[in-house]
Image (cartoon, rainbow, N blue to C red):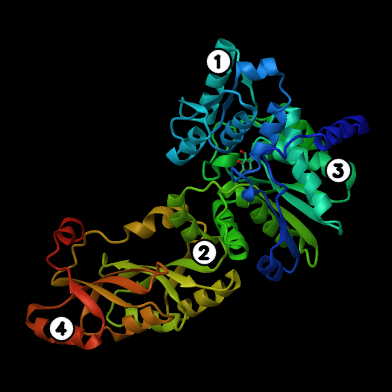
């Protein structure tokens, strides 16, 4: 890039008008993350902006430069969330009308937030691209001014004020700044400022592996449109990057990292542990990318900045995020363990697991010779896994690692069960026990060996009580002895053998 063009962006950023609506967000040291990663980690807290993302900077800088005649015509934009809120807030500040085209699939939470800011919402099409085409039609029909979410020098300059603030807020050396990429407006602005002022600082772009239009375009040397994008990180789910953002990214950005869903969930948890804030997936991508970059380059003792760029998270996604964070952090191993279908092998499996914390245990009898058990175990690092597999193998139990198996993680773990033709004399019980380390193994060990366990389901939910479902085969003549036995266990339980759901789905 010529010095003249870079200087042009520097001037635009220095002159950008953002502080009528945006705050200078804090640059905070993440103490826990720093200690864990052996580097000094700072977070640029754009999630603390009034609309919980940086997007209002670019939108306001663009819109505040419109003439009064243009403002009188009103503005239109297409967005599935954060840009829409930036445009709506800016329109309210500038006293102009805003029309926001959103895909019909937009969560109500996001469309409500935009409506509450006074914008008119048009729901159109299934994807951002459909909404975008319709917004361009409305621009033509009604003479509105179109406010692009990323491919506009004024939008880029508005986002660039984040780079300006980081360098002002942190005057010590910085090794690298990590930035999520969707269409590329944020990274273009940040990189333009940093390369003009302190070019020795690396700017690293982060994309989702299933939404990596910028990385693919850089590799190809020209803008590559994607057919499909993953939607987990909806803030960065862009099929076609901008022309200007592609040019700036190609010339100014030092490197790229691609991350997956589990890593982003783990990064949401990392941010929560240091800040008590919940980031949206796009908002945590900088942290996820930084962690990966540290591991790839063996960084130690460096100063690193990740931009936490958004927190518009739907509450109903938290369950998924919490579940995947464990795998992303490599604190949970998920294994399919095969054991012989014989009395005592269940117990031997438990003894081999030892005092490890069991996070999940699912089994349904299905074969006379072998039993396949889905086992989740708490681990402190992936390094422990070979040791666990080895001790299982010594007992003759084969264990398949399911860490990267989407089928297992997303579906199968909820489906283990079903009917079996081998369930004669089966009785079904729900038990509750206080959730303490080792409690499940203790429970399993207390099961009397003379009755066969034909079904077992347990998932640690982080609640105060562990809830498990057990199917046990007890001949009729031993029912009294069995009733006496479960009373001596001392756990709260309910007999579900007559429950119609059991007969509909399991019997
Ligand atoms: C939270 C969040 N992060 C990152 C991005 C990506 O920004 P850009 O499209 O400028 O690359 C967006 C875009 O809307 C976003 O909302």
Residue 114's place in the image compared with 101, above or below, is: below
Find residue 252 and report its image quarter: top right
- Dot 1 lies on which element? helix
The disc at residue 137 is 1
The disc at residue 326 is 2
The disc at residue 482 is 4
- Say which quadrant the C terminus sits in: bottom left
- Dot 4 lies on which element? helix
159 relative to 348 in the view: left or right: right
- Dot 3 lies on which element? helix
Q: Position of residue 112 (x, y in %)?
A: 46, 37
Residue 131's place in the image compared with 372, above or below, is: above
Question: In the image, which is nearer the foreground, mark 2 or mark 4?
Answer: 2
Q: CA distance from mark 4 to mark 3?
A: 74 Å
Q: Position of residue 357 (x, y in %)?
A: 45, 77
Q: State the residue position of label 3.
A: 195
């Amino acid at each position: 890039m010529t010095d003249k063009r870079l200087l042009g962006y520097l001037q635009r950023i220095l002159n950008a008008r953002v502080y009528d609506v945006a705050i200078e967000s804090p640059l905070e040291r993440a103490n826990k993350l720093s200690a864990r990663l052996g580097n000094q980690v700072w977070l640029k807290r754009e999630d603390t902006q009034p609309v919980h993302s940086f997007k209002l900077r670019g939108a306001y800088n663009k819109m505040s430069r419109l003439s009064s005649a243009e403002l009188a015509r009103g503005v239109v934009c297409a967005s599935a969330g954060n840009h829409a809120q930036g445009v709506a807030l800016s329109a309210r500040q500038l006293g102009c009308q805003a029309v926001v085209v959103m895909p019909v699939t937009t969560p109500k939470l996001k469309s409500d937030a935009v409506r509450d800011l006074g914008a008119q919402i048009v729901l159109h099409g299934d994807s951002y691209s459909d909404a975008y085409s319709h917004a361009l039609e409305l621009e033509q029909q009604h003479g509105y001014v179109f406010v692009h979410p990323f491919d506009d020098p004024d939008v880029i300059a508005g986002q660039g004020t984040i780079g300006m603030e980081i360098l002002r807020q942190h005057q010590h050396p910085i090794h690298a700044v990590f930035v999520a990429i969707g269409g590329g407006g944020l990274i273009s602005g940040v990189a333009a400022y940093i390369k003009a002022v302190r070019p020795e600082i690396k700017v690293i772009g982060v994309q989702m592996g299933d939404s990596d239009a910028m990385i693919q375009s850089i590799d190809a040397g020209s803008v590559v449109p994607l057919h499909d994008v993953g939607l987990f990180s909806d803030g960065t789910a862009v099929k076609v990057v901008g022309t200007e953002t592609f040019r700036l990214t190609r010339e100014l950005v030092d490197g790229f990292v691609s991350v997956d869903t589990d890593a982003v969930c783990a990064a949401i948890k990392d941010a929560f542990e240091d800040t008590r804030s919940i980031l949206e997936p796009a908002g945590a991508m900088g942290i996820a990318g930084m962690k990966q970059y540290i591991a790839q380059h063996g960084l130690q003792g460096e100063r690193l900045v990740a931009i936490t760029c958004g927190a518009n998270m739907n509450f109903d996604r938290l369950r998924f995020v919490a579940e995947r964070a464990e795998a992303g952090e490599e604190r949970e191993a998920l294994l399919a363990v095969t054991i012989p279908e014989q009395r005592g092998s269940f117990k031997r499996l438990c003894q081999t697991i030892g005092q490890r914390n069991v996070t999940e245990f699912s089994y349904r009898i299905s074969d006379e010779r072998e039993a396949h058990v889905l086992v989740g175990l708490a681990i402190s690092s992936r390094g422990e896994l070979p040791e666990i597999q080895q001790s299982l193998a010594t007992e003759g139990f084969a264990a398949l690692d399911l860490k990267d198996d989407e089928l297992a993680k997303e579906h199968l773990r909820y489906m283990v069960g079903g009917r079996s033709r081998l369930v004669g004399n089966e009785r079904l019980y729900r038990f509750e026990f206080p959730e303490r380390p080792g409690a499940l193994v203790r429970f399993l060990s207390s099961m009397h060996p003379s009755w066969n366990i034909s079904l077992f389901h347990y998932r640690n939910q982080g609640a105060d009580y562990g809830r498990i479902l057990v199917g046990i085969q007890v001949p009729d003549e031993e029912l009294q002895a069995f009733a006496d036995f479960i009373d001596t266990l001392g756990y709260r339980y309910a007999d579900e053998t007559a429950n119609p759901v059991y007969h509909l789905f399991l019997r």
